[in-house]
Amino acid sequence: MPKEMLPVVDRPVIQYVVEEAVAAGADDILIVTGRTKRAVEDHFDLSPELVTAEPIPAMVELDRLTERATVHFVRQRQPKGLADAIACAERHVGKEPFGVLLGDTINVCDPPLLAQLSRRFKELGSRKSVVAVELVPDSKVSDYGIVDGKEVRSGVYEVRHLVEKPPLAEAPSRLGITGAYLLTPTIFDAIRQIEPGRNGELQLTDALNVLAEREGVYAVTFDGVRYDIGDRFIWLKTNLEFALKDPELRERLVPLLRSLRP
């Protein structure tokens, strides 16, 4: 099963991601899938077998979501990295700036994270790509793309260089790229210039380095909380935190959690 289809309480992660994009104002969404991810496409399709006399609230909510935005799909023929996946969107986005969210990460932000990036993009001149970053603990530095940048205003860094998953001793900072981007269409030319890196994949950090030299890139912090569902502990933690926000589930969960205390 695709990790994007892992459930968090009552819906898969990918639905949270699409909801986040729509909340930020997106009405045209392209999801890049692969050979083993047909379930993602099926989830957003009509399911006649689930149509009942008594409407299912979760299905009604999903239908309303797909009415607010048109969802398209394109397949990445080989798992050749995030940069290659983004390149699959070139014909779709054309010459316009566009937002990118990862399918296994939920961002709980107010305003939505893409809206925050869009605001920063406009404030900074609407000419340079913007990537979301956050301070990561030393133990996690080697799991992230790390930014080497100069702070030009509070929470805004002009990127000098990005390093993909460096050892702690070689990391230029603790600013980790979280997986949310507002990119200019120049990124597609940059992707064509890079060579495969680790595991034969095209690294987005390499393409962003090309972009940083050509037109500049900003890294910005954001207001909100990010949940990386690729980590099984964080996935469990996310389920608990989200379930406790539901009044009915909270009423039943709190006594259970208290009873589990040693």
Image: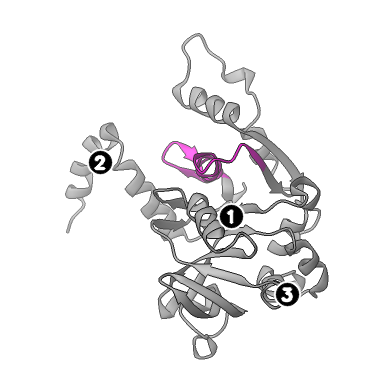
Q: Are marks 2 and 1 in contact (CB under 8 Å)?
A: no
Label 2 to label 1: alpha-carbon separation: 30 Å
User: Most extreme residue toward the bottom, as rendered?
Assistant: 169
Question: Which residues lie in the magenta part?
Answer: 5-29
- Which circle's residue, 2 or 1, is located before the other in the chain? 1
Report the amino acid beneath label 2. Answer: Leu
Asked whether the viewer can see residue 84, the reply is yes
Mark 2, mark 1: which one is toward the viewer?
1
- Which circle's residue, 3 or 1, is located before the other in the chain? 1
Does 161 sit left or right of 62 as displayed? right
Mark 2 closeness class: few <14, some 14–19, many ≥20 residues within 10 Å: some
Which SS class for mark 2?
helix
Label 3 to label 2: alpha-carbon separation: 53 Å
Report the amino acid beneath label 3. Answer: Arg
Label 3 to label 1: alpha-carbon separation: 25 Å
Which SS class for mark 1?
loop
Identify the mark at residue 253; answer none if there is no mark.
Answer: 2
